[in-house]
Amino acid sequence: MNRKALIVDDEELVRNYVRRALAGRGWAVTEAANGAEALRLAVPGAFDAMVCDLKMPDLRGEEVIKRARQACPAMKIVAITGSVSDIKAPLAPGVQADGFLIKPFGIDEIRDLLEKLTRI
Amino acid sequence: MTSKANILVVDDEPQIAEMISSALQLYGYAVQTAMDGEQGVARVGAGKFDLAIMDIQMPGMDGITALGEMKKLDPEIEVIIATGHGTMGTAIESLRKGAFDYLHKPFEIKELLKVVERALEKRKFNDITRAIFSTVRPEEQLRVIIDSVTRILKAEESLLVLPGRDGNPYIAVSEGLEDPGAAASRLEMCSRIMDAPEETSKSAVLSENPAGDRRFAGIAGLDKLKSSLFLPLREDNKPVGLIAISRLEDEAYFTEDDLQRARIFASLVGLALRNSSLYRQLQETQGQLIQAEKMSALGQLAGGLAHEINNPLSGILGLTQLVMENTDKAGQNYADLKDIEKAVFRCKKIIVSLLSFSRQEKAHLEPVSLNEVVEETLTLCARQMELQRIKINRQLAPGLPMVNADFQQLMQVFLNLFTNARDAMPEGGELTVSTSLDGAGGRPAVAAAVSDTGGGISPEIAGRLFDPFFTTKAVGKGTGLGLSVCLGIINRHNGGIRAANRPGGGAAFTINLPAL
Ligand SMILES: Nc1ncnc2c1ncn2[C@@H]1O[C@H](COP(=O)(O)OP(=O)(O)OP(=O)(O)O)[C@@H](O)[C@H]1O
Ligand SMILES: [Mg+2]
């Protein structure tokens, strides 16, 4: 069965390679370029996993994660960021991402992490 | 006060220009606005501004070009650049072109006011520094020192006293002291101060109503003086002279603000005396004075930079690896892609070391008074604290032994601790700094404690406070290197640093350094 992932990042470059990396492993991937779009797309049952950047122009990544988590409790969430100082943000109470990657990260890192998180 | 400064706001969006200028006017600044780069430059050409706040993206002449033109017209103007999202590159370029700092739009008014205050503070340094170093002959230099201190502190009398060859102090330069009797009495006051080590170890000594001051008992002719301020000058931590500044009867007393200015001034003069190579000195002086602040600014800049670079870098890495998957592993293409991949990892490493480098310094050990380090650092932070409604309590023990230390690095330690305390008290509060003699470890040591009335340290994070990159602060705000830098510096000084919670709430950081 095809697993479904949502990639949220304002950087097209990052969305592009994450989508293709996951597609290569049989994921159906949807892209969102900002937080608002992501929250519109993230309805219960729509995705098995979400990969979300922490720094976007509209909403803070933490906020997106928090709300997506409330909307879809079963969805696994991976936070990604280019800034080492963000390390604590996705672990904060109420946010609690399931995984975390610091940019630059490679295709195998994101594949392995998502597979580990969604393995039944 | 600095509030009489003239500020030029340049922004093509009228609402933003309006918002900024009304905020600044509310705080007592005189503000003019310009709609674009050309108009801004024309304004600078026509009038005298202390500071310009300028948008970077404008139709016609952009902010960077306008910045260059303004600096050509008036090299002394300070420029703060306002940038939109994703223009980190231009922000850095503007700093290189001489902008004082940059602000990310949308910015809070509080943030704006802080940067404005800082820029104006720096201008004050510039004025004084230039006055001191622009003359080359040493005799003239001393004259300029006295002239500018008299002017800056709005005083009637001032004199510079230096130790003579015979060991007796003499008046090297004076201002407003034509009467020989008056001059003699002022010299006698200065000699008393210079003979008292507990006075010369201070950065400034104040006497309100000198005629009634026990320290000057028996000196005639002091009745006319309302208030006198003495600034001990030191070289390699030995007293080498004294500046005395007085206001007469119907003038106002010196304020805390005057004292702060005087301290900054004294450290400049101290530096001037230390080194005869004037031009190198000019850079060093400014450098050292704003060093500490720059260091943390640089850390933040590196933090932001990392983010901007890591995004495209991540794309390069991911796409390279995707192409590698479809490439024959035996071919040259694959080997080339592997090299690109390696290069990305190298870049990643460079960014990490950039972050730590921006926080490091070579140690230069000398006998240092911990109290003085605390005072100097507080001077740097006082305004920021005031803006955030933080009250500063000083509990500095007198007569402490010196420590063998690098003054700048210890300043950095306190600056980091004060910054952390400030960040822990966003709604205001109290910062208490105390120093004491610490005999607990068997051999004599000097201790300093920095405590705040913020939220304190939760047990979950207590074990990781000093870890590099450990931070609980928001994106772009903290690098998590502050305390690890403190730990590194204190370790190199053979001392110790500990964190604890205060019984009444808030955090307390304690430092121990071996006494000399
Ligand atoms: N006075 C304090 N009160 C409460 N927590 C504190 C205090 N000082 C430090 N901390 C905690 O320790 C963490 C690490 O501090 P550190 O100074 O090393 O990094 P930072 O302040 O986050 O970032 P920066 O590198 O910009 O200083 C802070 O993020 C904060 O959670
Ligand atoms: Mg800090």
Image: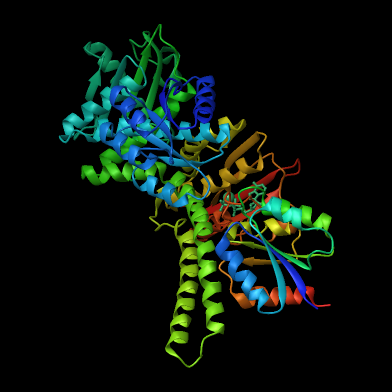
Residue that extends furthest to the top in the rendered view of this protein: B250
Q: Choose between B147 and B214: the one closer to the eye.
A: B147
Q: Choose between B422 and A11: the one closer to the eye.
A: A11
Rendering coords of residue B422 (x, y %): 61, 40
Q: Choose between B118 and A33: the one closer to the eye.
A: A33
Rendering coords of residue A72 (x, y %): 83, 59
Q: Is residue B407 visible?
A: no
Q: Count the labels in the image.
A: 0
Q: Which image quadrant: the C terminus of chain A? A: bottom right
Does residue A108 lie above or below B359 as drawn? below
Rendering coords of residue B377 (x, y %): 48, 40
Rendering colour mode:
rainbow
Say whether residue B274 is left or right of residue B386: left
Q: Choose between B76 and A31: the one closer to the eye.
A: A31
Does residue B494 lie above or below B446 as drawn? below
**What residue do we see at 53% from left, 79% from top?**
B323
Does residue B304 lie above or below B427 as drawn? below
Q: Which image quadrant: the N terminus of chain A? A: bottom right
**What residue do we see at 32% from left, 42% from top?**
B285
Say whether residue B223 is left or right of residue B84: left
The picture quadrant where one finds residue B45 is top left
Q: Is residue B67 visible?
A: yes
